[in-house]
Amino acid sequence: MNDTPDTLVAALERHDIDLPTEQIELLDKYCRSLWAWNEKLNLTRHTDYEKFVTRDVVDAMQLEPFLEAGDHVLDVGTGGGVPGMILAIVRPDLKVSLCDSVAKKAKAVAEIVRETGLDLPVHHQPVQEVLHSHTYNSLVARAVAPMTKILRWLSPHWESFDRLLLIKGPAWVEERQEARHEGLFRHLELRKLAGYPLVGTESESVVLSIRRKDH
């Protein structure tokens, strides 16, 4: 049995994720800060490098090809900073902001941002309030709420952003059906941009794009 402690470098190599050294060092600083805060506040279930890479890093890396240089991105319901902080590290050309409606989570992630050495706005507000005064190219969200609930939140605010990128598990098909039944796709279109295996399971995660039909 190998008792050598795992490292982020080794976990990334196991999953063929190749990043510059300075980005790996920032990711390591970020996840260590996240784990330290997690002892005080439940921010993540991914408290070893293998889970951090196979869940958090993989999800963010699936999003990043669909973001253009210079895009303004808002991470909705960021929790511990996923996927927004990871996107900010691996794509320093993006302008990433984070928001969470739970004040204690927003305060914790603001401290994690500071400890990691990043310069990212953190909004201690629901996304609806943020969109009253800010505009974005893309909203990104993972494990925040069912599609129906998210689309209801955003319904009055489509003038403030171009599209919503969602990371969803296999239940997305049923969620889409429910949202259609509720009439929430009347003026919207959904595209599946990517599908990828959820490591260690037989399930598939997907990246979905939702935008206005006239956009």
Image (spheres, rainbow, N blue to C red):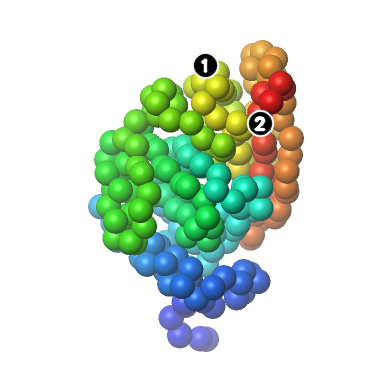
**Foreground residue, 201 or 62?**
62
- Residue depicted at 48% across the width and 68% down the height: 23
- Residue depicted at 51% across the width and 26% down the height: 160
The crowding category of the residue bearing disc 2, from other C-alpha atoms within 10 Å (few below 14, some 14 to 19, many at least 20), is some
Is disc 2 in contact with disc 1, using a CB cutoff of under 8 Å?
A: no
Mark 2 secondary-structure assignment: strand
- Residue depicted at 68% across the width and 17% down the height: 187
Mark 1 secondary-structure assignment: helix
Left or right of 20, for residue 44: left
Q: Position of residue 120 (x, y in %)?
A: 38, 49
**Foreground residue, 73 or 35?**
73
Report the disc number at residue 210: 2
What distance separates the C-alpha of mark 2 from that of mark 1? 15 Å
The image shows residue 151, relative to residue 206, as above or below, that is above
The amino acid at mark 2 is Ile
- Residue depicted at 28% across the width and 36% down the height: 103
Q: Quadrant of the C terminus?
A: top right
